[in-house]
Image (cartoon, grey):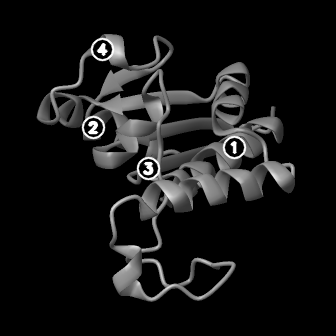
Amino acid sequence: MSGKKLAIIATKGSLDLAYPPFILGSTAAALGYEVQIFFTFYGLQLLKKELNLQVTSIGNPAMPMPFPVPVMLQTLPGMQSMMTRMMKNKMKKKGVVDLAELRDLCIEAEVKMIACQMTVDLFDFKRSDLLSTCEYGGAATFFEFAGEADVNLFI
């Protein structure tokens, strides 16, 4: 092991923004880093046993679309589900690993996943909703590790 440490704060709960903390975390672990990911606010969705994440182009003008879709049409009911299906299909065709599998890789690589206790309480999550492998802590828990980390990322 290199002795290096990576600390990540995961704050997003959409399908497209769920990948970076798990890709970076699993890669760093494979390179010998000790890794902790602190899941807070909407990032807590990534620790749910059942992942049901969506993607939307609203507020994300950089999202490539197979054809131009005016913003007004993107707000119609069902568009988010359609875009999520399109994204999942594209990922499958391109061989992108399933998010649950990627998360399992992190668990196997001993990436420490910490659920923000304040956010758990704020959104009335039950511990039974979240992975049994995650730990619970607050900002002080994160800072204890992040203060010694070689790399700190906010996603």
Kind of element beneath mark 1 = loop
Mark 2 neighbour density, 10 Å: few (under 14) some (14–19) many (20 or more):
few
Write down the residue under mark 1: 4
The residue that mark 4 highlights is 127
Percent position (x, y) of residue 89? Answer: 72, 52
Q: Earlier in the sequence, mark 3 or mark 4?
A: 3
Q: Is residue 75 left or right of residue 23?
A: left
Mark 4 or 2 closer to N-term? Answer: 4
Q: Which residue is mark 2?
A: 140
User: Foreground mark, 1 or 4?
Assistant: 4
What amino acid is found at the position of numbered circle 3 in the picture?
Ile
Taking the image as drawn, is residue 67 in sight?
A: yes
Q: Nearer the viewer, residue 2 or 96?
A: 96
- Mark 1 or mark 4: whose residue is earlier in sequence: 1
Q: Are marks 1 and 4 in contact (CB under 8 Å)?
A: no
* N-terminal label among 3 and 2: 3
The type of residue carrying mark 1 is Lys
Q: Amino acid at mark 2?
A: Ala
The answer to whether 83 is drawn above or below residue 107 in the figure is below
Percent coordinates x, y for residue 138 in the rendering: 26, 34
Q: Which residue is mark 3?
A: 9
Of badges 1 and 3, nearer the viewer stands 3
Q: Residues within 10 Å of mark 4 (few under 14, many from 20)?
A: some
Nearer to me, 88 or 68? 68
Q: Earlier in the sequence, mark 1 or mark 3?
A: 1
Q: Disc 3 vs disc 2: which is toward the camera?
A: 3
The answer to whether any part of residue 150 appears in the image is no
**Splitting the image into 4 quarters, where does residue 98 fall?**
top right
Residue in view at x 36 percent, y 43 percent: 143
